Image: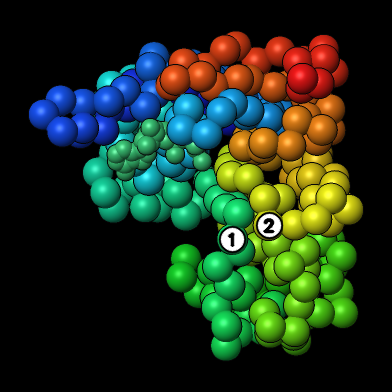
Amino acid sequence: MTALNLVNVTLEYPDGEGTMTALDAVNLAVHPGQFVSLVGPSGSGKSSLLAVAATLIKPTSGLVVIDGVDATGLNEKELAALRRDKVGIIFQQPNLLASLTAAEQLVITDHLRGKSPKSAAARAIELLDLVGLADCAKKRPHQLSGGQRQRVNIARALMAQPKVLLVDEPTAALDHARSDSIVRLLREVCDEFNVATVMVTHDTEFVPLTDAVATMRDGVLTAPVPADAGVGAH
Ligand code: ADP
Ligand code: MG
């Protein structure tokens, strides 16, 4: 089964008297453990695609199917639950809470899902270890580097054991070495958790670390091609 399936998804935004088409009959199927890069010029619709896949925006038409569940048939409450349980979202800016330690950033997500705080604490430590931050569990955001904050962000997104991980320009605020290690970490996470991962990136250099690359242009998405086919090279 595909973990994420977008079928003929069109998204129109109001634009003056008319509308503008941000996503134009987009199709994308991502399997568990598959890592897809999404590239394309600024304004081409990449973030819109992630927002629709995350069920944060309802498409004008088409289907968004997450782990076999058609999100387009759900009400707001059901959507919120689907998002919470199945979708991990990682944006460019980690958006950590300034007053919480790294471990607490993770634990609080389980509180919000109504999970047992005790198991949450143990899992938070495990995940921080996995992202290479075993020693930083008690540090607050200002005591962490940009790369470390992004690692906390990634660990936090994994607390719910999502089926789908949506990552928007995770390296935009980082230097080259840190960017490289973040994409390698996402590769590991994708493999280890068997999570379907879509990463928007302007760094085509990192495309070969992923399985497939799809290109967005004016809301039209090309079918993904193998990432080592050289498409990311230009
Ligand atoms: P990308 O992430 O590839 O830079 P976006 O998905 O952010 O592209 O934007 C695609 C197009 O949709 C752009 O023309 C942008 O201006 C427009 N757009 C994005 N969000 C909105 C919105 N909330 N309302 C209206 N237009 C929007
Ligand atoms: Mg964007």
Horizontal and vertical percent position of residue 153: 65, 63
Disc 2 Cβ-to-ligand 2 distance below 8 Å: no
Is residue 88 in sight in this rendering? no
Q: What's the amino acid at mark 2?
A: Ala
Residue type, numbered disc 1: Gln
Residue name at image x 63 percent, y 80 percent: 104
Q: Is residue 146 above or below residue 196?
A: below
Quadrant position of residue 117: bottom right
The residue at which mark 1 appears reads as 93
Asked where in the image residue 98 lies, by quadrant, the reply is bottom right
Quarter of the image where the C terminus is located: top right
Residue in view at x 68 percent, y 28 percent: 36
Question: Could you tell whether 5 is left or right of 117 in the image?
Answer: left
Residue 48 x/y as whole percent: 43, 36
The quadrant in which the N terminus is found is top right
Residue 54 at what x, y percent from top left?
A: 46, 42
